[in-house]
Image: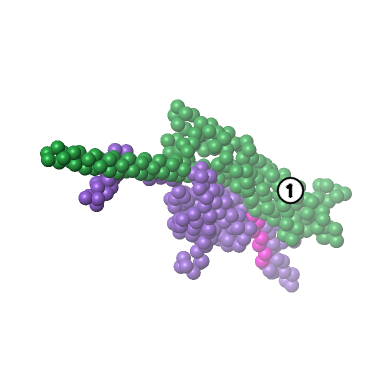
Amino acid sequence: MKKQSVAAACMTALLLLTTACGKAEAPVLPVPQEEQMKAICQLAVLECDYHNLAKFEQKDASKFLWMTKDKRFWVEYSATAVLGIDVNQVSMELQSDVVKVTLPKAEVLRCKVNGDSLSPDSYIVDKDSAPVTAEDEVRAFKEAQNKLQQTVEADGDMLDLAQTRVEDLLRNYVNSLAKATGTEYQVEFHYIEEDETA
Amino acid sequence: MSKDWLGAFGRTLDRKLRKWMMILIVVLAAAVAVLVALRVNEHRKKPEAQVLTVSTLTDMIPVSDLSTVTSTYNGVAEVMNEKNPDKLDYYVAYEAKVQAGVDFANLQPEIDEASKTVTIRVPDAYYMDADVDMASLDFMFNSKKANTSGVTERAYKACQEDADRECSSSEAILELARENAVNAVEALTRPLIEQLYPEYTLVVE
C-alpha cells in the first residue's frame, strides 16, 4: 500500500513537470562557426601595391676592336600582390571553451604587373651602357613579370603581416562573440606544415 | 456492531486522506522547486537580448593595426649636382616600406531600423610614412666625380624625399589601403551581425 502511494506520488510529479508547465527549451548560444571563420579568412587577404625595380646587367654586351661595353639599365614598374591563406584548408574545432583553428601559412595568392605602369620614363639607362634596344626592354619586362612572384614570396615581412592579419581578425571574431554571449573562449592556432598539405 | 465498524472505517479513511494530502503537498513542493531551478538556470544561460546600436558596432571594430597597410616601394631618386642643379649627378635606387591606412575612429556606422540595414562608411585612406632601407641603396652615376665618401647621406635624404612625394600621391597605394580597410571592417562585423543580429543586412562602403 505504501509503495503504491509513493509510485502514485512520483507519477503525479512527472505529470506536473511534463504536461502542466511544459518542458523548458534548451538555450541556444551563438558559438564560433567554421563557415564564418572561412568567410573572415576570405576577407583577410592583404592586397598590396608592389612598386618594383628590375635591374639588368649584361657583361660585354658590345665589342669594338678591343673595347667592350656592358649593358646596364633599370626598369621601374608597379604590380599588385594579393597575400592570404588558402581558405579551403581552414578548419575549426570547438572543445569546451577552447577554439582550435587549423590553418595554412600565408602565401602569395596572386600577383600581376600593372602594364600601364610602364612608360618611357620607367627605363633608366646607365650613361656608359651599351645601347638598349626595344628587344631588351621587352625581355626586361617579361623577366620582371616572371621574377615578381619570387620577389613577393621572398618578402617575409609582408607574409608575416598577412598572417598576423588573419590571426587578429579570427581572434577578434571569437572574442566579440564571447563578449556578446557572456562566455569565454581561448583561441589556439595550429599551422599546417607544408609537407602535410602535399 | 455496525456502528463500531463504521467508526473504524471513518478513522481509516481519515488517516488515508491525511497521508495522501501530505504526499500531494510534498510532490507539489518538489515540482515547484524543480521548475524554479530550471527557470533560474535558463535565465543565467540565455544571452540577454541585445539591441544593436552604433556603440555596439563601434565596439566590434577595435582601433588596431588592421586599419593600416604596408606596401613595398622600390623607387629611383634623381640627385642633381649641388652647384649646377640642371646637371644630374646620379640615380639612386632604394627600397622603402610604406604605410597607408584609414582612421577607424572616423568610421561612420548608421542603423536604419525601418529597413533593418546597417551601413558602415569607410573614409578615404591617407599616407602615413615611408621608411627607406639604407642598405638597399644602389647607384648609377652620371658623373663619376659625385662618387665620394659623403654620397650615401645625401642619397638617403633624396630617397626619403622621393618616397614621401611619390607615395603620398600614389592613387594605387591609397586605393589599396582603403580596399584593405573595407575588407577588414567587413571581416570584423559581418560574422557577428549574421550570428547575433540576423534580422539586419550589412553594407560596408
**Residue tagged 1:** B162
Residue B72 in the image: state x and y as whole percent.
Answer: 65, 53
Q: Residue at x 72, y 52 (%)?
A: B131
Three-letter residue code for mark 1: Asp
The answer to whether one can see residue A146 in this image is yes
Q: Which residues are drawn in magenta?
A: A51-58
Picture residue at 24% right of the left edge, 52% below the top: A3
- What secondary structure is marked by label 1? helix
Looking at this view, name the residue that lies furthest to the top: B114
Q: Is residue A6 magenta?
A: no
Describe residue A122's horizontal placement relative to residue A88 as left or right.
Answer: right
Q: Which residue is drawn at 52% across and 62% down?
A: A191
Taking the image as drawn, is residue A77 in sight?
no
| Chain letter, colour green in render | B
Q: How is the image coloured?
A: by chain
Q: Of all residues shown, which one is farthest toward the right?
A: B83
Q: Nearer the viewer, residue A109 or A3?
A: A3
